[in-house]
Amino acid sequence: MKSVDAYSAVVGRWPIIVMTSRGDYYRQRWDIAHELGHLILHDSEVAISEQVEQEANQFAAELLLPAEQVADVLPTSAARGHQLIAELTPIKEHWGVSFRALLRRSRDLNRMHQSTFQYANRVLDDRGWRTYEPGKMQTLEMPHRLPEALARYIGYGADRNVILQEVGIPRFLFESIISRRPIDVLPNSQD
């Protein structure tokens, strides 16, 4: 059986994405974008098929590597070994995706020939980079619009506690979602 790195579902009225702890930062970003694609594009009753998975991957590719912005920086050839890695590393770190995602996007946008794509993937396999890859992790994405919207809403006289009650989620989760930076918020039995 193939291992599952992430899963998404709608529970009640809440869309959720469940992640495993496997994989590196770059791969997890892809998995989250892929699952978001399922939540947006597919009814939760749709059976998993190759086409459904491909659609979710296309969504993730366009979300994380928009064709109009990335096409000109994607590799068209596969330099030998360390040169390929040296060429891909700054692109990987800028866009926050794996080497494989860059290669696949380059191939899908017809920037790279199939044989070159296969060679480049063999280089990664030879280095043992199927699941984990080297690279500097970017600063984690943080919400900006949601905290701004909440601050404005409160500025217009809305009560934070009323908003929390209307949202209908535990306070610790609400505070985590609207924070501008990662915070350690533990559930409190009083909330």
Image (tube, helix red, strand yellow):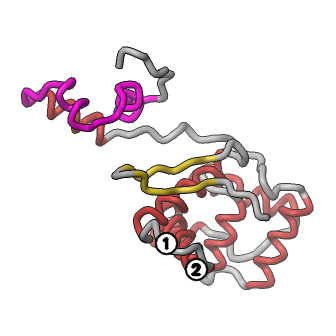
Disc 1 target residue: 67
In the image, the segment drawn in magenta is 155-181
* Residue 148 locus on image (x, y percent): 25, 35
Q: Which numbered tag is attached to residue 17?
A: none
Q: Residue furthest left?
A: 157
User: Could you tell me which secondary element the residue under label 1 belongs to?
Assistant: helix
From the viewer's perspective, is 159 left or right of 176?
left
Disc 2 target residue: 109
Is the C-beta separation of discs 1 and 2 under 8 Å? Answer: yes
Image quarter hosting the C terminus: top left
Foreground residue, 111 or 153?
153
Q: Which amino acid type is marked by label 1? A: Ala
The numbered mark, 1 or 2, whose residue comes first in the sequence reads 1
In the rendered image, residue 176 lying in the magenta stretch gets the answer yes
What's the CA distance linking mark 1 and mark 2? 8 Å
Residue at 81% in and 58% down: 130
**Is residue 4 shown above or below 73?**
above
**Is residue 56 shown above or below 159?**
below
Foreground residue, 68 or 187?
187
From the viewer's perspective, is 119 left or right of 55?
right
Residue at 66% in and 78% down: 107
| The quarter of the displayed image where residue 124 is located | bottom right
In the rendered image, residue 87 lying in the magenta stretch gets the answer no
Residue at 69% in and 57% down: 4
